[in-house]
Amino acid sequence: MLNFTVGPVMSSEEILAIGAEQVPYFRTQEFSDIMLENEALMKEFVNAPESSRTVFITGSGTASMEAAVMNIFTPADKLLVIDGGSFGHRFTELCDIHHIPYTAIRPERGRTVTEEMLAPFAGQGYTGLLVNIHETSTGVLYDGRLLGDFCRKEGMLFLVDAISSFLADELDMLEIGADVIITGSQKVLACAPGISIIVMGPRAIARVEDNESKTMYLDLKSALKNGERGQTPFTPAVGILRQINARLRQIKHEGGAKAEIAKIKAQAEDFRSKIKGLPFEIVSESMSNALTPLHPTGASAHEIFLELKDHYGIWICPNGGDMKDTIFRVGHFGALTPADNDTLIAAFKDLQSKGKL
Ligand SMILES: *Cc1c(COP(=O)(O)O)cnc(C)c1O
């Protein structure tokens, strides 16, 4: 299968080979060294403030979204949540579950958040803002600098779910003033799913230390404490952490985050140039390099997904809910090349010749 979804995506041969190895025992200095290197490279790639920390949670991206929300905030907070799609909506559900007061800002699907939309919330006592900087369900990339400036002026904590944006788009924690960055193993890191990652700046760490623990497995206080010696409180997904180490080292070797972002940008631009002339409309006003959200004008998006999967050995990413028949997404990360884009375009053209597009 050729995989253009938004995760899990295709891994390189090197990463696959690690997945095939025996999983080593992990309460060792050797494994601690790997973890400490993972932490340092994560901090480097998001340009985290000096005293920041990184923790690795065994669980998919949502586990880290929940861990961040429940360890950093309390019912005494008052949050703004950007709810522009299914991942933004997940933050509102997490706030509901953990009784954290919030107001949701709901931009129209496919639209970004503007300064005018934020203005009414200035001076209202909000203490934090939660955003999925790339709302993967609609393909919208929000303006991190705009949101960060608002938080800075208001003295709010700024929590950024960059799960599908880390290593696809520029992401500079210091520059945008983010207190928290979250990502996961199965997106641009292109490893197996099962690990999510939280980078925390000093203000977020102070919150975690001051708040009472309300969870054992997702307790960030104990994750931070154990992380000081390169360990985790419980048995982590050791194999995936070893894959992440190989991947981070490879990215460093090839020029760091900037070079990786440039590679994905080129893959996205190659695809976007090649779909000109096909019966698709791009449905986002501000796109990430990670994926292209498309509205097929002459056929059901879900039918196209099924045709490609069942007859061409190609996965594109279907949408759910009310977007099921109108939108599909094509991812640009994982072990993909421009030649793979050609294969996908040829399949689209073949479908078109059969009257199915
Ligand atoms: C993939 C993704 C997640 C996490 O989803 P999981 O299925 O829990 O890994 C969260 N937020 C965004 C923006 C994502 O793209």
Image (tube, grey):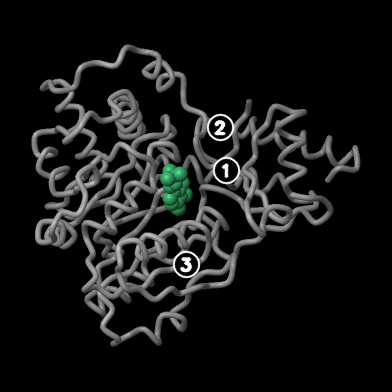
Please report the residue visible at 18 percent of the width from the left and 23 percent of the height from the top.
31
Q: Amino acid at mark 3?
A: Asp
Give the spatial CA distance, label 2 vs label 1.
9 Å
Dot 2 corresponds to which residue? 336
Circle 2/circle 1 CB separation < 8 Å: yes
Dot 1 corresponds to which residue? 331
Please report the residue visible at 23 percent of the width from the left and 42 percent of the height from the top.
217
For residue 83, which numbered disc appears in the image? 3
Report whether residue 151 is seen: yes
Please report the residue visible at 14 percent of the width from the left and 23 percent of the height from the top.
27
For residue 240, which numbered disc appears in the image? none
Note whether 167 is above or below 238 in the view shown: below
Question: Mark 2 or mark 1: which is in front?
Answer: 1
Mark 1 CB in 8 Å range of ligand 1? no
User: Callout 1: 10 Å neighbours few (<14), some, many (20+)?
Assistant: many
Instruction: Tally the numbered discs.
Output: 3
Question: Mark 1 or mark 3: which is in front?
Answer: 3
Give whichever of discs 1 and 3 has the lower sequence position. 3
Give whichever of discs 2 and 1 has the lower sequence position. 1
Note whether 83 is above or below 306 in the view shown: below
Give whichever of discs 3 and 2 has the lower sequence position. 3
Which corner quadrant of the image does residue 241 belong to?
A: top left
Asked whether, in this view, residue 138 is left or right of residue 134, the answer is right
Q: Secondary structure at mark 3?
A: loop
User: Which image quadrant: the N terminus?
Assistant: top right
Q: Amino acid at mark 2?
A: Leu
Report whether residue 164 is seen: no
Q: Amino acid at mark 1?
A: Gly
Q: Nearer the viewer, residue 142 or 1?
A: 1
